[in-house]
Structures are given as C-alpha cells and as structure tokens.
Amino acid sequence: MKSLRRHRDRLPVLGCWPQPWFKDESVWHMFELQLKPDGNVDWYLRRDDVAHGGYGLIVYQDYDVAVAEAKSTNLLLKHAVSNLALPFEQAESIRLKVQKALTAEERLIGEERLMLMEAMKRHAADPRPRLEDLTVFNGNDVLQAELHKRLLQYPYVQLVFLARYGALLEREGRFTWRNIGANSLRVARYAYREKIARGFGMSGTDHWGQTKAAIRDALLPRANKLLQLASVKLLLADALYRGQRVLILGNFVFWYENGVVPQWVVKQVGVSGKSETGETVWFEGTILSKNHGRIVVLPYIKANGERVQGHTKNAPNDGSALPRHRNDYVELPFEVLNGDLMYSLFGELKYE
C-alpha cells in the first residue's frame, strides 16, 4: 500500500500502474515510477497538471480502465530511459529497476484481486445480519448502518475500517462490535487485508507474506480443477501442438509432465530469494527442471544484470523436492498468458 505522496520536484516519469486506495475500496489512484536524483526509482502519486495547480487528485472508479490507461502510457514511456542521455551502464541499471518494479506491481495487484474474489465466493452463501441485530459499542447509528453495508458484502470479516468516520470496528460476538477508533494508513492496510485473509480463515493483522503463501496453497486445488474445463483443455491442447509445455497464467503454471503418464499439472509461480514481489522476469529465458518441485521460479535478472536460469523447487516447509534422474532433466521455454484470464477461468468453476 502506498501513501498519497508527491515528490517536491518534478522528476522523470518512467512508468505507471494503478493502486487501490484502501480507505475507499471504490477508488483507484495512478502512481508513477519516477527517477530520483540519487539514481533510484520510487512510486509517487501522479500529478494533475490541470486541476489545483498540479496537485489535484486523479481518481478512477474502475480498475480495468485504470490498467488500460497505464498500459498505453507505459508504451509511450518505453524509451524514456534512453531519452535521459545517461551512460550505458547506468541506463541499463535504471531500465532493470523499472522493469522489476512494473512487473512486481502488476503481479502483486493481480494476485490480491484474485484472492479477494475467491474469498468472497467462499462466503457467498453466509447469512447476512439484519441492521437491527447489530450493536456497536462506543459507536452510534451511523456507524451501525455503515457496518451493516460492509457486512452485506463481506459477512465473514472481523475487522472493518470506516475512514470517513475515523472508526476501526472489531467484532466481539456474533452481532456485537466495538469501535476502537484509529485513522491511519496502517489500520487501513489491516482492514484491506482482512477482506482477503479472513475469507481463508486467517487474520488481516497476521504476517502478510506468510498469509499469502498459505492462501496460494489453498487456491492450488481450485486451480487444479481448471484442468477439467473444456476451454482449458483446448487451450492446453493448442499449446502442446505448438510445442509449448509451460504456460504462466497469473501466479499459476500449467506444466506438461512427460512422465510414465504424460499429463498437464498445475504448479505455482515462485520468487527468487526472500523477495515478496519478485525479480525482473527475463522472458527470453528458459526453465531448467532438475526435480519435481511444485514451485516454478521464472528466469530473472539481478540488479547487476546477471541473468539467472529458471528452475523448480519446493516451498520452504515441503522438504526437498523429488529429484529427476540426470537423463530426465528438462529445459523448457515458457509462455506468459494474460493474467486476467485467470479471473474468468476461476469464475467458470462451480461449487458443489
């Protein structure tokens, strides 16, 4: 989550991507990746050069509209680094930072949107409380009414933040809540995460990296059901016909395992090192699989420009991945599909 900050100087803009405003879930702001005087890049809120002397807010009510604008703008900024007339090595370093930041932002927002969608579906049939049943200690009728609106949409949460009233509401019983009041970005972050985490039985105040790792594991069985869809079968059959055996879709991988029983399996996209947001993906690289790990780390580029081979591994708590015989090592190219396709595919699956 990014604060609504702007740099005091007008800095070179190298890319952009929308961010949700967690104090108001219907609002998206465009953030720009700007080059600071020290050679590093950072995210700042886009200025409105027309309204309010360059300091007006540009608000989007639709994420897809904001993304479409970001992508078109990023195409226009494709050569922005080259236009800075910097020494080659410095320009390459900045270009890698920009690629990494944009890739990480798109993957991060896309993954959390998918997780939120699944959390809401898991609780679609939950009973909604009646307004008159709710009690808000240290609150009033207005907070009770606003809480009711949120629970109609997210009946499973135990933490609700009402930014307009500076109120943080915490569930104490089935219908009882307490206003513990706190108006800060940290509180807004917890309430945003609560809508995702609580849908999978976890808390929005828990360690976010560990929570998301657990949610990825919870989503894997559902992702495996995609293999049963006729549309996915056609997609994979076409890929195999073209000689493609690894398809990246959002944070999942369709991987063709050419073993005793050749079949498509679903793995998870992993990240290198300890980075939550990943590295700069090297799309021309390949994946060398020496084991049957369920995590696929895509080829990536380090900050110093070193290109690292993609590979497979297990998650930290899984133990060592079953190794392949040296004669069975496979080195495969991969294809990245439109991540939005994952939303529509998950939407096709029906619950029992």
Image (spheres, rainbow, N blue to C red):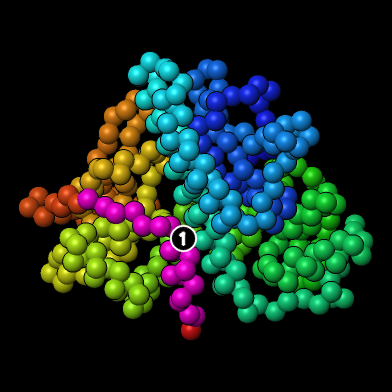
Q: Which residue position is annotated with label 1? A: 340
In this view, the residue farthest toward the bottom is: 352
Picture mark count? 1
From the viewer's perspective, is 5 left or right of 70? right
Q: Taking the image as drawn, is residue 211 in sight?
A: no
From the viewer's perspective, is 180 left or right of 71? right
Q: Nearer the viewer, residue 298 or 179?
A: 298
At 42% from the left and 31% from the top, the residue drawn is 79
Is 169 drawn above or below residue 101 in the view shown? below
At 49% from the left and 20% from the top, the residue drawn is 39
Q: Nearer the viewer, residue 60 or 334?
A: 60
From the viewer's perspective, is 315 left or right of 6? left
Q: Amino acid at mark 1?
A: Asp
In this view, the residue farthest toward the right is: 140
Q: Nearer the viewer, residue 319 or 181?
A: 181
Q: Which residue range is magenta in the image?
A: 333-351
Which corner quadrant of the image does residue 241 belong to? bottom left
Q: Taking the image as drawn, is residue 20 in sight?
A: yes
Does the magenta-highlighted stretch encompass residue 191? no
At 56% from the left and 65% from the top, the residue drawn is 117
For the N terminus, give its image quadrant. top right
At 69% from the left and 44% from the top, the residue drawn is 58
Within-10-Å neighbours for mark 1: few <14, some 14–19, many 20+: few
How far across and down, in percent of the image, does residue 133 sit? 84, 75
In this view, the residue farthest toward the top is: 87
How far across and down, in percent of the image, does residue 129 sit? 77, 76
Q: Which secondary structure lies at badge 1? A: helix
How far across and down, in percent of the image, does residue 50 sit? 72, 36
How far across and down, in percent of the image, does residue 190 sit? 67, 50
